[in-house]
Amino acid sequence: MSIINTDSAEHYKWGNNSDGWHLLKTNSLSVIQERVPPGESEYRHYHNESQQFFHVLSGTASIDISGVVHEVQAGSGIHIAPKDPHQLSNQANMDLLFLVISEPMSHGDRVNA
């Protein structure tokens, strides 16, 4: 067991210029820190098995869940159940930094909606 942060975690890029860091990556649980620059968004999708919790560290996340847009501020979070179509975007003028916790891990369980 060791302490992990974005300097030591497995890193990946997604979208045009967004970043993700695997802080914990097991088949049953995933914790990822992500950075999304202003104007960026992910594709609308859902997960057949994975439930997720998005916790905003800084900035504001706009998360459309089943057609309802939620503005999630720093220090707050939102749960997304399996099979709920969702899309995260950063409509603010500063970077969005958040944690996404998935149970079980969501990689490989993503279906475009």
Image (cartoon, rainbow, N blue to C red):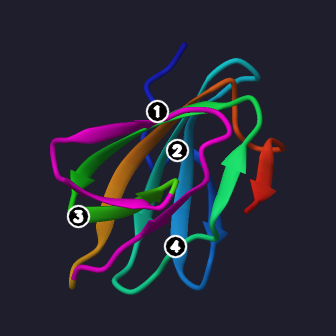
Between tags 2 and 3, which lies in front? Answer: 3
Count of numbered marks:
4
Q: What separation in Å lies between label 4 and label 2 (alpha carbons)?
A: 18 Å
Q: Position of residue 81 (x, y in %)?
A: 55, 32
Q: Position of residue 88 (x, y in %)?
A: 46, 63
Q: Are marks 1 and 2 in contact (CB under 8 Å)?
A: yes
Amino acid type, callout 4:
Ser
User: Residue 43, located in which quarter of the rendered image?
Assistant: bottom right
Q: Are marks 2 and 3 in contact (CB under 8 Å)?
A: no
Residues in magenta, as a range:
67-92
Between tags 1 and 4, which lies in front? Answer: 4
Checking the image for residue 4, the label placed there is: 1
Marked residue nearer the N-terminal end (1 or 4): 1
| Element carrying mark 2 | loop
Q: Is residue 54 above or below residue 104?
A: below
Identity of the residue drawn at 70% across and 18% down: 28
Q: Residues within 10 Å of mark 3 (few under 14, many from 20)?
A: many
Q: What separation in Å lies between label 2 and label 3 (alpha carbons)?
A: 26 Å
User: Viewed as shown, does residue 86 lie left or right of 55?
Assistant: right
User: Residue 79, located in which quarter of the rendered image?
Assistant: top left
Marked residue nearer the N-terminal end (4 or 3): 4
| Element carrying mark 3 | strand
Q: Position of residue 2 (x, y in %)?
A: 50, 20
Between tags 4 and 2, which lies in front? Answer: 4
Q: Is residue 87 magenta?
A: yes
Q: Residues within 10 Å of mark 4 (few under 14, many from 20)?
A: some
Q: What separation in Å lies between label 1 and label 4 (alpha carbons)?
A: 20 Å
Identity of the residue drawn at 35% across and 51% down: 98
Marked residue nearer the N-terminal end (2 or 3): 2
| Element carrying mark 1 | loop
Checking the image for residue 8, the label placed there is: 2
